Amino acid sequence: EAVLFKLTNFVCENHNSSALLIQQCRLKAVRRGKVVLNFVATVLKPVDDLTGRFQVLKKANGYKPWLVDRTLDFCRFLDRPYDPYAIFIYKFAKEFSNVNHSCPLTGSLIVKDFYPRAEAFKLPLPTGDYILSTNWQSHHVTQLVTNISFAFVEDLISG
Ligand SMILES: *[C@@H]1O[C@H](CO)[C@@H](O)[C@H](O)[C@H]1NC(C)=O
Ligand SMILES: *[C@@H]1O[C@H](CO)[C@@H](O)[C@H](O)[C@H]1NC(C)=O
Ligand SMILES: *[C@@H]1O[C@H](CO)[C@@H](O)[C@H](O)[C@H]1NC(C)=O
């Protein structure tokens, strides 16, 4: 199978070690061309207010902001998904994650062996290197920053 979408790097930056413990933040190559993402963290104090900012950056003489820059009330979203971009990402990630309930978030947060499924191959993205950068704030203070890097090759055959 052709490699059209490949995770290339995953970075997590914990900004509040009294609120969050990150136990795992890494990519793993499971077989030729397939890379999965694992994230394990423990929320040490229940979180009832969480805002996520999702930015897509595309490489062109360094990484530059590229089209998507959304800020999301994540607790509201968990009650009733409302943002189309976030719904798109959440649909991908949901089955790999243990976050399937509304706030407060507490205890372990797990994303296990996540990889982009077939839907991802229909994304209207030009070929290139990208970063999905997320910034998570609670009560307006950054708690966690993650960068997921991926390479995408446009599917010229079905497109
Ligand atoms: C870090 O998290 C703790 C526990 O939730 C909270 O009381 C504190 O205000 C946070 N610190 C910052 C700088 O957000
Ligand atoms: C949420 O996920 C947990 C395990 O990750 C499962 O035990 C539970 O039944 C799920 N709850 C819902 C509402 O899907
Ligand atoms: C995420 O990537 C952007 C663009 O390269 C960079 O400016 C930022 O410092 C990175 N953040 C982390 C936590 O690696």
Image (tube, rainbow, N blue to C red):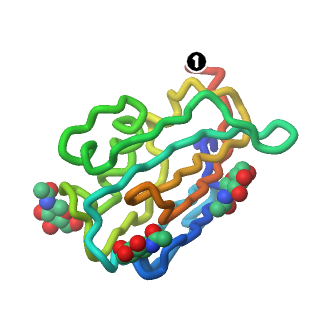
- Left or right: 120 in relation to 77: right
**Depth check: 47 or 125 in front?**
47
Find numbered disc 1 in the image and state the secondary structure of the residue it sits on: loop
Q: Where does the image place residue 132, in percent across and percent down from the top left?
A: 58, 46
Looking at the image, how many numbered discs can be counted on the residues?
1
Q: In the rendered view, tell whether residue 24 sits above or below residue 111.
A: below
Q: Residues within 10 Å of mark 1 (few under 14, many from 20)?
A: few
Quadrant for residue 34, please give it.
Answer: bottom right
- Left or right: 152 in relation to 134: right
Ligand 3 shows up in the quarter that is bottom right
The residue under label 1 is 159
Q: Quadrant of the C terminus?
A: top right
Q: Residue at left 36%, top 68%?
A: 110
Any part of residue 41 in sight? no
Q: In the rendered view, tell whether residue 40 sits above or below residue 115.
A: below
**Depth check: 9 or 67 in front?**
67
Q: Where does the image place residue 45, in percent across and percent down from the top left?
A: 30, 76
Q: Residue at left 58%, top 43%?
A: 1
Residue type at the position of mark 1: Gly
Q: Residue furthest right?
A: 61
Q: Residue at left 54%, top 70%?
A: 15
Q: Residue at left 50%, top 27%?
A: 122
Q: Where does the image place residue 46, in percent across and percent down from the top left?
A: 26, 71
